[in-house]
Image (cartoon, helix red, strand yellow):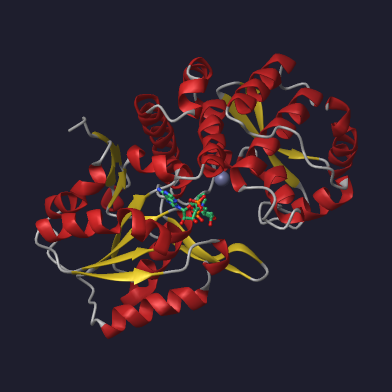
Amino acid sequence: MKQTKKIPLDLGKNSYDIFIGEEIIDQVGLFLKDLSFKGRVAVVTDPKVEGLYGSRVKKSLKKAGFKFILIQIPAGERYKTLKQINRIYDSLIQNHFERSDLLLALGGGVIGDMTGFAAATYLRGVSFVQCPTTVLAQVDASIGGKTGVDHPEGKNLIGAFHQPRFVCSDPAVLRTLQKREYRSGLAEVVKYGVIADEAFFGYLETHSKAIRDLDLEKVRHCIHRASQIKAEIVQADEHEGGIRKILNYGHTIGHAVETLTGYRKVKHGEGVAMGMVAASRLAVELGLLHEDDVKRQVKLLTAFGLPTRLPDLDPGDILEVMAGDKKVVGGEIYFVLPKNIGSVDVMKVDKKVLKRFLKALPKYV
Ligand SMILES: NC(=O)c1ccc[n+]([C@@H]2O[C@H](COP(=O)([O-])OP(=O)(O)OC[C@H]3O[C@@H](n4cnc5c(N)ncnc54)[C@H](O)[C@@H]3O)[C@@H](O)[C@H]2O)c1
Ligand SMILES: [Zn+2]
């Protein structure tokens, strides 16, 4: 058995550990036992992940002496709805789940966000644990207690803060992800290097090929360091009053691109990759960042097989979507802008400056 690493996340009475290690998905029952948990478990997952990992999780729970039920949600963002949350409630009620029972999210960020939200609201709150199975879910969505669902008017408009009891991240499960899905998740890993840790960014540069090709030893380090950075940021600002906003690096323009391309052509991480490069170019224009630090990001993202140029979109449309974004306060657009690799600032940017910049952006192509 490979070594399991533990990252403690200190949030007072909401504190928990993030466990990271290959094949630890088989130990989830033991982790629960270590919490002195005695209730029943509702495993919430999607058909794809259940087919791949359901039996291992069930076996682990059984071995540790836990009773469980299984709740299946169809895979994909379009099922991240209150309707599906209702289906979870129905199963919990039919099975007489009580306050002392627990939900276990087994899947990507969609399953994690929904399971967490169901747990936050069922009987005014029951415990839940996270077994994230995508890169994005392991380094981002499973950590920090943001849970929720989408509304026809926008993503993640309904939700609650509810911290899990632990996170169980097994890098070995990433092997079954589609290549594009895996690489898209790497954009978030790059993000952590730019916002908080130049040495980690350097590690990604040095080992870019091995990481792209899923060399597990390197990938384990990536998941570990990225989770550590996320944990530190959440610890400093649990409810996103301040510093947690820096996690939005690359997301302002990235979200606009996702929205304008109908969430189909561009994967989330791909939008973030383009958004990070665009935000960095903006930082250069504003005299905050050196051009070389944009080039380093472009080179690394390209090595990971990620796009770095915006598709052909109207600058006015991009601006409009950004202005309608939740992150807009008083009509001004906030941007997370790098000062160098390893540190960023959150700044207001004038809309006129932004429009001029977006119009000029294709000249960098
Ligand atoms: N709560 C937060 O702080 C937070 C942060 C970032 C993103 N999110 C949310 O995360 C969601 C995106 O998550 P995602 O990118 O993981 O997408 P996802 O949950 O839709 O998963 C992507 C696909 O991969 C499949 N899959 C999952 N694990 C697999 C595995 N190991 N092998 C093979 N296939 C597998 C799933 O069935 C699904 O089809 C969004 O809804 C976003 O809002 C939440
Ligand atoms: Zn993201």
Is 271 on the left-hand or right-hand side of 113? right
Reply above or below: 7 against 154.
Answer: above
In which of the image's four quarters is ligand 2 placed? Answer: top right
Reply above or below: 363 against 158.
Answer: above
Look at 70% across and 31% down and name the residue there.
277
Compare residues 110 and 47 and report the one nearer the observer. Answer: 47
Reply above or below: 71 against 237.
Answer: below
Q: Position of residue 197 (x, y in %)?
A: 49, 23
Q: Position of residue 249 (x, y in %)?
A: 62, 38
Look at 37% across and 78% down and name the residue there.
89
Is 209 on the left-hand or right-hand side of 339? left
Look at 32% across and 41% down and name the residue there.
170
Which quadrant would residue 270 be assigned to in this image? Answer: top right
Is 356 on the left-hand or right-hand side of 49? right
Q: Position of residue 136 (x, y in %)?
A: 48, 44
Placement of the C terminus among the 4 image quadrants = top right
In the image as oriented, which residue stretches furthest toward the bottom? Answer: 94
* Total count of labels: 0
Compare residues 188 and 65 and report the one nearer the observer. Answer: 65
